[in-house]
Image (cartoon, coloured by chain):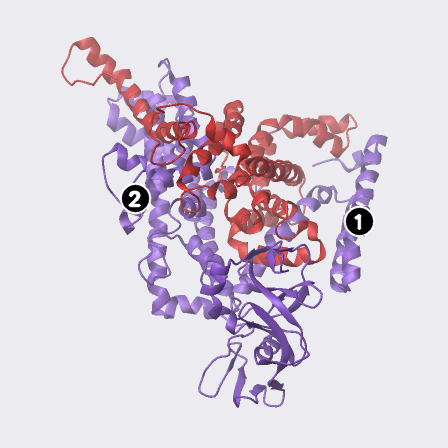
């Protein structure tokens, strides 16, 4: 416990530093406030003012000194760890994803815009199509009247700055977007047919070939029946507020829906929908196998080498050790990519060295063997290091006693060394399990989840995390809600594992003092 | 290595049973460990640069691939390297500094809510940043609307995520170490008139240099190796980090002749990480047994 009286003696240098830091905070606060004021985001501004007030209060008071040390970390933690976790949990209870990205109002506008018919006075645009990093289709438009560039989504039209255009004025590149090539455009024309950009209550922009036009819609929304009517085709879509879609009377959904809370729907899907449950359980089983296998193999090799080198006076141990750390010190992402190449069927090193002709990525089990081999390579030096550390810390008297009692070699190892080692290393083995359980890099960079059987959304080597990632950011339609539900599920598993670990280690920690 | 025979002359059997097998195991492990590394070296110096023409041991020598790394317009390796450093170094420094502040509070002060906060920190750090990748994407999408410098596709945005992500682990690691620094030192300094800030900056931080080094390295290496967040955040080719950039050079995405360039890039990247690891080897074992897993 620190003596409070010590705080009375403030020295000059400390005071100057404190004033300088607070001045920087104030300057940052002003800088951060300007865009909020400009956008009229008053809630944001109030939040910012509150944060700044807390910071000033904490550093100007003298009672709770610990707060001065906790505030920076707490703020960072709230913004970039706690808030994302809370949002993830929130998203997992919604149908957020492709087709359900926007609120109901925007969805209505988008459906109305899709019914747009060209009018003589409407603007026409040169069309390019881009995908934002989250995979949202965006029309990159060049106004043929004045050459200005615009970005249109089902939410509306925004001005596009910094776009590169070719001689005709068509957008060829834009910051934040992957622009489709002409081939893409031809191939995926169908996806564009239903995409429309609302520009007003009853006007919108529609795609036609390689250009787009603005016009008036034949559809309108009627609040009384909560439905949209198309006067040209006499179709009526009724809003279904539970699933966030507009449905015709015979159950046809309009292409654009909106974001609603669907309760535990995403979680229930995993349990009740056989199309999801089957692959999900398969992925889960393999995920456990992968994590357990990685720990087992890396530990076996690491412990074996550590035992071999744990002999005082043996020549060359330092050199051996330095070389054995090498795989651990190499950048793991790059080495995973190297391993992926080494397993290449035609030119890879493995097939060449062992004179094999195995298509490693082709079969589920060969791909699984491959990722386990590569992951073992990456992980064993870590196990070697911690095993060696633990071996050298073993009490020598129990080993001496065992020797006197006649326990030699294997028996001494099995009955004395291994149990003692496991006591020290179990927490590390468990955290290694938790780490590998979520080893996104290993799977993504080695196999990318391959092999995929025809029509399956799940690959043979997919882990839950790569599966979730593909649901959200893969090439097929994005389902953020479902992906978030899987994330929460993974978290629950890892938290359970870690709770076990915590029981193991808590004796050593100071938490309870 | 001499093969180990079961029946032989006595001194040899003794040597084999005592030390010989140890060398044998060590060599086997070394071969397993070094083959991919030798292969990378061989590929990097292979003048042809294709996967098919690369063998385990180099057959000829050329710096062709390294040259292309810096001259090929399609491979902005220098900017990838610079991007990775510009993100990883400040992120590691700042997050380690902030964690050390929090660790000091948890180690030296007793206040209400200390234990729940520590447990909460343990819990939240189990939720790795990349699990919340969808949410992070949304958050930074809206941050970018107000502050374009820190939105998606910016280095600052990615850096902030990494800083938040490394916080929980390093706070725990450092708190554990701070607990081993005797509190009597603090008390003596207090009696001498030192303020809490002087104790922290002048005494605790220098004493905790080993753990700061190890947490810093782990945060740095973890950031360098991250693929999932960097691939989502930085999509423009010159803005990419090494992990994302080098992946674009492998067979799936690029012509086969880029394999040599990829290997050369890997080699240059590893010079950095290997140098860091080797120079701090003696801290690493103690840091690892303290509960850190390389991310």
What kind of element bears circle 2?
helix
Q: Is residue A49 left or right of residue A363?
A: right
What kind of element bears circle 1?
helix
A8 relative to A140, above or below = above
Horizontal and vertical percent for residue A483? 48, 61
Callout 1 environment at 10 Å: few (<14), some (14 to 19), or many (20+)? few
Residue A57, label in figure? 1
Horizontal and vertical percent for residue B109? 67, 40
A475 relative to A447, above or below = below
Q: Nearer the viewer, residue B147 or B286?
A: B147
Q: Nearer the viewer, residue A64 or A491?
A: A491
Chain A color in figure = purple
Chain B color in figure = red
Residue A369, label in figure? 2
Residue drawn at x 64%, y 37% is B90
Q: Could you say which quadrant of the image residue A442 lies in?
A: top left
Query: Callout 1: residue from which chain?
Result: A
Horizontal and vertical percent for residue A88? 55, 60
Residue drawn at x 80%, y 56% is A34
Residue drawn at x 51%, y 33% is B69
């Amino acid at each position: 416990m620190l003596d409070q009286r010590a705080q009375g003696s403030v020295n000059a240098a400390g005071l100057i530093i404190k004033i300088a830091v607070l001045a920087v905070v104030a300057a940052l606060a002003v800088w951060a406030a300007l865009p909020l004021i400009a956008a009229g985001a008053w809630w944001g501004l109030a939040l910012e003012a509150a944060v700044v007030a807390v910071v000033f209060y904490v550093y100007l008071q003298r009672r709770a000194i610990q707060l001065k040390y906790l505030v920076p970390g707490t703020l960072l933690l709230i913004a970039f760890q706690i808030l994302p976790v809370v949002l993830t949990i929130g998203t997992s209870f919604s149908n957020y994803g492709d087709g359900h990205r926007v609120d109901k109002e925007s969805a209505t506008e988008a459906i109305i815009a899709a019914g747009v018919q060209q009018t003589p006075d409407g603007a026409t645009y040169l069309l390019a199509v881009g995908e934002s990093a989250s995979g949202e289709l965006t029309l990159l438009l060049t106004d043929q009247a004045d050459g200005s560039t615009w970005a249109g989504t089902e939410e509306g039209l925004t001005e596009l700055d910094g776009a590169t255009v070719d001689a005709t004025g068509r957008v060829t590149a834009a910051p934040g977007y992957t622009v489709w090539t002409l081939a893409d455009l031809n191939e995926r024309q169908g996806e564009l047919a239903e995409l429309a950009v609302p520009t007003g209550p009853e006007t919108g922009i529609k795609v036609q070939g390689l250009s787009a036009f603005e016009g008036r819609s034949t559809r309108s929304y009627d609040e009384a029946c909560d439905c949209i009517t198309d006067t040209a085709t006499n179709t009526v879509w009724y809003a279904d507020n539970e699933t966030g879609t507009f449905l015709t009377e015979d159950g046809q959904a309009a292409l654009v829906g909106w974001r609603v809370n669907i309760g535990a729907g995403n979680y229930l899907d995993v349990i009740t929908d056989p199309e999801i449950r089957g692959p999900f359980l398969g992925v889960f089983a393999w995920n456990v196998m992968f994590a357990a296998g990685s720990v087992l193999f890396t530990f076996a090799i690491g412990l074996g080498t550590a035992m071999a080198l744990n002999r005082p006076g043996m020549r060359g141990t330092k050199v051996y050790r330095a070389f054995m750390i090498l795989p651990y010190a190499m950048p793991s992402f790059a080495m995973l990519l190297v391993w992926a190449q080494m397993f290449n069927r035609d030119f890879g090193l493995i097939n060449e060295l062992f004179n094999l002709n195995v298509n490693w990525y082709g079969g589920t089990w060969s791909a699984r063997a491959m990722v386990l081999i590569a992951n073992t390579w990456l992980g064993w030096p870590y196990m070697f290091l911690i095993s060696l550390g633990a071996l050298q810390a073993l009490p020598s008297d129990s080993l001496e006693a065992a020797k006197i009692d006649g326990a030699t070699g294997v028996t001494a190892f099995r009955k004395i060394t291994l149990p003692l080692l496991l006591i020290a290393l179990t927490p590390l083995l468990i955290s290694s399990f938790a780490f590998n359980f979520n080893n996104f890099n290993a799977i993504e960079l080695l196999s990318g989840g391959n092999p995929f059987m025809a029509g399956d959304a799940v690959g043979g080597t997919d882990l839950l995390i790569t599966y979730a990632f593909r649901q959200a950011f893969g090439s097929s339609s994005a389902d953020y809600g479902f992906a978030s539900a899987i994330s929460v599920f993974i978290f629950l598993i890892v938290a359970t594992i870690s709770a076990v670990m915590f029981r193991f280690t808590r004796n050593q920690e100071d938490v309870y003092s | 290595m001499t093969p180990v025979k079961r029946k032989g002359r006595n001194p040899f059997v003794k040597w084999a049973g005592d030390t010989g097998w140890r060398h044998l195991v060590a060599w086997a492990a070394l071969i397993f460990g070094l083959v991919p590394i030798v292969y990378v070296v061989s590929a990097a110096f292979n003048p042809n640069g294709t996967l098919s023409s690369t063998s385990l041991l180099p057959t000829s020598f050329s710096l062709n691939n390294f040259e292309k790394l810096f001259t090929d317009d399609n491979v902005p390796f220098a900017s990838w390297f610079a991007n990775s450093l510009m993100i990883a170094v400040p992120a590691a420094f700042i997050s380690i500094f902030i964690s050390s502040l929090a660790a000091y509070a948890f180690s030296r002060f007793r206040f209400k809510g200390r234990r729940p906060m520590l447990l909460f920190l343990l819990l939240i750090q189990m939720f790795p940043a990349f699990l919340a990748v969808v949410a992070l994407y949304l958050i930074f999408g809206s941050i970018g609307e107000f502050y374009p410098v820190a939105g998606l596709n910016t280095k600052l945005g990615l850096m902030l995520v990494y800083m938040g992500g490394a916080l929980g682990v390093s706070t725990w690691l450092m708190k554990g170490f701070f607990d081993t620094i005797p509190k009597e030192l603090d008390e003596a300094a207090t009696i001498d008139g030192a303020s809490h800030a002087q104790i922290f900056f002048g005494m605790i931080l220098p004493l905790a240099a080993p753990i700061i080094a190890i947490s810093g390295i782990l945060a740095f290496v973890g950031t360098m190796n991250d693929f999932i967040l960097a691939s989502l955040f930085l999509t423009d080719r010159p803005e990419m980090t090494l992990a994302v950039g080098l992946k674009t050079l492998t067979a799936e995405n690029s012509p086969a002749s880029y394999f040599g360039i990829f290997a050369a890039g890997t080699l240059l990247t590893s010079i950095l990480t290997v140098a860091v690891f080797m120079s701090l080897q003696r801290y690493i074992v103690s840091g690892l047994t303290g509960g850190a897993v390389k991310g």
